Image: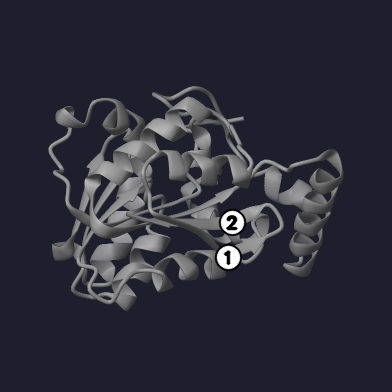
Amino acid sequence: MQQIFPGEVFANTADFDHGIRQLLPRYDEMLEVITRCLSSTTRRILELGCGTGELTLKIFQRFPDAEIISLDYSPRMLQCAGNKITSAGYQQRWTGIQADFGEWANNPENLAIGSGFDACVSSLAIHHLDDPMKLKLFQRISASLSQGGYFGNADPTLPESSVLAEVYQSAREEWAAQQGTNLGAVRAKLGSSSQQGYSSQDQLATLDTQLQMLVKSGFKTVAVPWKYYDLAVFSAWT
């Protein structure tokens, strides 16, 4: 099995966009919710883990005047995202930086991206951090947003019980079947990942645990605008 960075998921980049939609129910809807929660005055956005650029493009389509800085430690993901963004004509408004957002959380002075962001967004990335690093990252995000700033994160969450774990697994299997495949076939395309910087394979936390982390990080409003079984978009405002 090919070695990949945590978060890349699939061994071949060409499989990612189609494969993730087979693996995760309502993927596009989940990302759409993040963009809908952005204020109409949003201009300066920090994205943590851009992947292939799907969320980035959805934001640009809704906010063509936005400026987005995307951090991702995967060169192939940055290249894939950059190609899409260039093809869509937004390359002048996007900056892709090869960096580990765990390192940014720990040592922000080593990454000259500034602060005062209107929003910070992330999808399918933060769950690769352990819980102490999740908290540290949420604290860094809170400190980097302007007043009233928005943080939106889409991620899988840890089942609260063995009963729910079975329910969530069944929902994913049914979803894959509706897409004309099965989870075994999709997972056959996955790569194998090991520790990379601050990230490793899935280190899920319950939704409640992460909401408490956001409150502890100083966010004034915390909400869950979208949830589908174990997938959630949880949001917070400073």
Residue at horizontal 32 percent and vertical 76 percent from the top:
61
Report the quarter where the N terminus lies. top right
Rendered residue at 44%/33% (across/down): 135
Residue at numbered disc 1: 226
The residue shown at (75%, 63%) is 175
Location of the C terminus by quadrant is bottom left
Q: Is residue 73 visible?
A: no
User: Disc 1 or 2, which lies upstream in sequence?
Assistant: 1
Q: Report the Cα–Cα distance between label 1 and label 2.
A: 6 Å
The number of numbered badges drawn on the structure is 2
Q: Looking at numbered disc 1 in the image, what kind of residue is underneath it?
A: Trp
- Coordinates of residue 60 in the picture (x, y in percent): 29, 71
| Residue at 79 percent of width and 49 percent of height | 169
SS under mark 2: strand
Task: Reply above or below: 86 against 157.
Answer: below
Residue 157 shown left or right of residue 225 in the figure: right
Residue 32, relative to residue 95: is it above or below?
below
SS of the residue at dot 1?
strand
Residue 2 horizontal/vertical position (percent): 55, 31
- Can you identify the residue that label 2 sits on? 232
Q: Quadrant of residue 146?
A: bottom left
Tell whether label 2 touches label 1 (CB within 8 Å).
yes
Q: Percent from the top left, x then y, of residue 208? A: 61, 45
Between residue 132 and residue 186, name the one nearer to us.
Answer: 132
Does the rendering let one see residue 165?
A: yes
Q: Residue 113: where, in percent of width, then height? A: 15, 43
The foreground one among 82 and 32 is: 32
Q: For residue 176, what is the image quadrant? A: bottom right
- Please give left or right for residue 36 compared with residue 45 in the image: right
